[in-house]
Image (cartoon, rainbow, N blue to C red):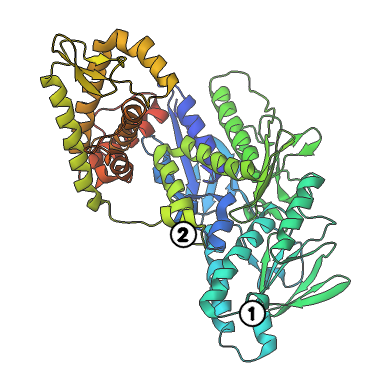
């Protein structure tokens, strides 16, 4: 009998639950999987600050749901659910109703304004794709207006930017702003000293969940960058042009970015289900609610571990989403459900592009490793939901399409140029490798050993023996001793074998470059081959240009005018299909 599993929400928990259901269900199980979300895309919430702070384009933080569930039978429905009837197993929107046998509520969370007067009306939140764009455009407008504002007080209000909340999101967005405002000041002719950045926190410390050392490092870095940090400063009221702080002087500003708290999605206000703090749905160890066929996962769920509710983190969402999916399958199969044993590895907080702190498994990592780790975590996640295609897109946005002021190295590698103009170099390099391979075949490299060492009275790369037979000497006076040992011990005694490998490599490189097939890999192999020649006999006047030419081909010349244009996308599709279906489909055209 068919079972219909509906997942409400296409966030981290919802995506994980849907992919787990699809991958773990058996071929003979008739299970329909449906994802319902008000958006057609999945938002990378942990990267919202990068768009709001104008580090990357907005396309870098969204992934179309159709791309995530490509090559699966998961159905995607774009609709906004306003209520749930648990008695009749129906989700209700303004235009229709959706039936389910099992339901996973993964509708996420939204900002919590804590009933602060004027906060909802006059602050900017950072909790969605639209929020990030709204903040970015608002800040641009403030600088534009300030550049022509004659009234000193009004100009000061426009150039004062306040972030409410010293948690992860607040620290990350103010870190982005401190970099971006430098470029904005140059663009609008405004002195940097006229811009005020303020981070307000109601608690005695920012990043209160981190260890004291990381709190101190983060505080010192932000203050060095000109960020004012106000602690023990709860905001009491907000107005269009200023805000009030309990027991302290207020601040005149047109910009308050509110990041100080979250609560479960507003749908929890409508549904009849047990709730905990911040309206999060109470669940048991199986991620199940009081209704046996209804589960909750992610930020909307109050999963208790060690007498405390799990924090609203991506790892929490992924683990509860997977648990809900596995236990639905267990229930369908009549097997025992599994209790989730949370395994949270840690947190990372970036403060702009060049500073980050992290605590992984109780360890505090150095800044550079924290920065790298944040990138690697995102790459790992994107690879899991969409393969190489999403990873490449992420890398391009983070390094090639970066919009903020860059270091000299970043500035150069992010210059995008038409790769078509690399094709002539690629073709000439391919022709050169091919002719080298063919010339060796004509010289008899397939038939007799040609590689030799260095005689006592010669150091040329090519010479003749006493019988007049030509040899190719791979050791000279300039050859490093360790390489000479490898040549004497391994290569020369097996000369014919290595000669065949060299010919195959040269001919293969020639064909690869000429046809534009696996050009990136061919470029790496070409560089390695030339380094090998350089170590043995050195480069000659006719092939010294091979290494820089191979470096140029790494820029995608095979996609511009070559088979890579068709082959690389095809292989990406195959990998994506294989990851989700554990098999390949030969004719996979889209």
Q: Is 22 left, or right, of 546 in this rendering?
A: right
**Marker disc for residue 57:** 2
- Provide residue 399's location: percent of width, then percent of height: 47, 51
Q: Are marks 1 and 2 in contact (CB under 8 Å)?
A: no
Label 1 packing within 10 angstroms: few (<14), some (14-19), many (20+): many
| Residue 417 to residue 6: above or below | below
Q: Is 515 left, or right, of 334 in this rendering?
A: left
Q: Earlier in the sequence, mark 1 or mark 2?
A: 2
Image quadrant holding the C terminus, namely top left
- Answer with the quarter of the image where residue 443 lies: top left
- Provide residue 403's location: percent of width, then percent of height: 48, 61
What residue is pinned by disc 1? 158
Please name whichever residue, 310 or 382, is drawn nearer the observer in this view of the structure: 382
Please name whichever residue, 175 or 448, is drawn nearer the observer in this view of the structure: 448
- Provide residue 319's location: percent of width, then percent of height: 62, 34
Residue at (62%, 53%) from the top-left corner? 267
Q: Is residue 128 visible?
A: no
**Marker disc for residue 395:** none
Kindly report the distance in space between the C-alpha atoms of the residues bearing marks 1 and 2: 24 Å
Q: Is 493 left, or right, of 510 in this rendering?
A: right
Residue at (70%, 77%) from the top-left corner? 253
């Amino acid at each position: 009998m068919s079972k219909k599993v509906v997942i409400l929400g296409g966030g981290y928990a919802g995506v994980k639950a849907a992919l787990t259901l699809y991958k773990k269900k058996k071929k003979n199980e008739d299970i329909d999987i449906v994802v319902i979300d008000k958006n057609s895309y999945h938002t990378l919430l942990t990267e919202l600050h990068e768009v709001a702070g104008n580090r990357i384009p907005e396309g870098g933080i969204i992934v179309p749901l159709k791309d995530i569930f490509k090559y699966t039978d998961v159905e995607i429905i774009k609709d906004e659910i306003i209520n749930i009837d648990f008695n009749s197993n129906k989700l209700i929107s303004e235009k229709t109703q959706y039936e389910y046998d099992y339901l996973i509520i993964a509708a996420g969370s939204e900002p919590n304004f804590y009933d602060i007067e004027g906060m909802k009306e006059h602050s900017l939140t950072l909790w969605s794709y639209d929020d990030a764009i709204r903040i970015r455009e608002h800040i641009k407008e403030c600088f534009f207006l300030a550049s022509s504002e004659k009234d000193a007080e009004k100009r000061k209000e426009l150039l004062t930017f306040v972030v409410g909340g010293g948690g992860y999101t607040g620290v990350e967005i103010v870190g982005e702003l401190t970099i971006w405002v430098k470029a904005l000041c140059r663009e609008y002719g405004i002195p940097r000293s006229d811009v005020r950045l303020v981070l307000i926190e109601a608690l005695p410390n920012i990043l209160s969940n981190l260890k004291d050392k990381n709190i101190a490092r983060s505080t010192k870095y932000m203050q060095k960058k000109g960020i004012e940090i106000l602690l023990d400063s709860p905001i009491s009221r907000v107005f269009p042009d200023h805000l009030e702080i309990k027991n302290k002087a207020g601040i005149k500003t047109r910009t308050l970015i509110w990041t100080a708290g979250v609560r479960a999605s507003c749908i929890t206000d409508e549904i009849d289900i047990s709730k905990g703090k911040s309206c999060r749905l109470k669940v048991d160890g199986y991620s199940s609610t009081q209704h046996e066929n209804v589960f909750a996962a992610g930020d909307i769920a109050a999963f208790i571990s060690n007498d405390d509710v799990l924090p609203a983190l991506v790892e929490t969402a992924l683990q509860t989403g997977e648990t809900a999916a596995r236990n639905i399958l267990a229930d369908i199969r009549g097997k025992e459900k599994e209790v989730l044993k949370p395994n949270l590895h840690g947190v990372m907080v970036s403060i702009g592009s060049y500073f980050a702190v992290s605590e992984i498994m109780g360890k505090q990592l150095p800044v550079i490793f924290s920065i790298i780790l944040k990138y690697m975590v995102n790459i790992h996640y994107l690879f899991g939901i969409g393969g190489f295609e999403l990873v490449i897109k992420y890398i391009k946005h983070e390094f090639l399409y970066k919009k903020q002021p860059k270091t000299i190295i970043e500035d150069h590698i992010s210059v995008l140029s038409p790769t078509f103009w690399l094709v002539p170099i690629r073709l000439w390099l391919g022709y050169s490798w091919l002719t080298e391979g063919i010339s060796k075949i004509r010289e008899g490299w397939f038939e007799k050993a040609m590689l030799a060492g260095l005689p006592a009275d010669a150091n040329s790369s090519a010479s003749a023996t006493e019988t007049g037979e030509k040899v190719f000497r791979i050791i000279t006076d300039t050859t490093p001793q360790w390489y000479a040992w490898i040549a004497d011990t391994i290569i020369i005694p097996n000369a014919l074998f290595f000669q065949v490998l060299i010919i195959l490599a040269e001919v293969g490189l020639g064909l690869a470059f000429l046809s534009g097939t696996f050009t990136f890999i061919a470029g790496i192999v070409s560089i390695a081959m030339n380094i090998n020649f350089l170590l043995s006999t050195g480069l000659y006047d006719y092939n010294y240009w091979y290494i820089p030419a191979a470096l140029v081909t790494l820029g995608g010349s095979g996609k511009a005018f070559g088979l890579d244009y068709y082959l690389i996308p095809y292989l990406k599709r195959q990998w994506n299909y294989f990851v989700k279906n554990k098999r390949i489909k030969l004719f996979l055209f889209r």
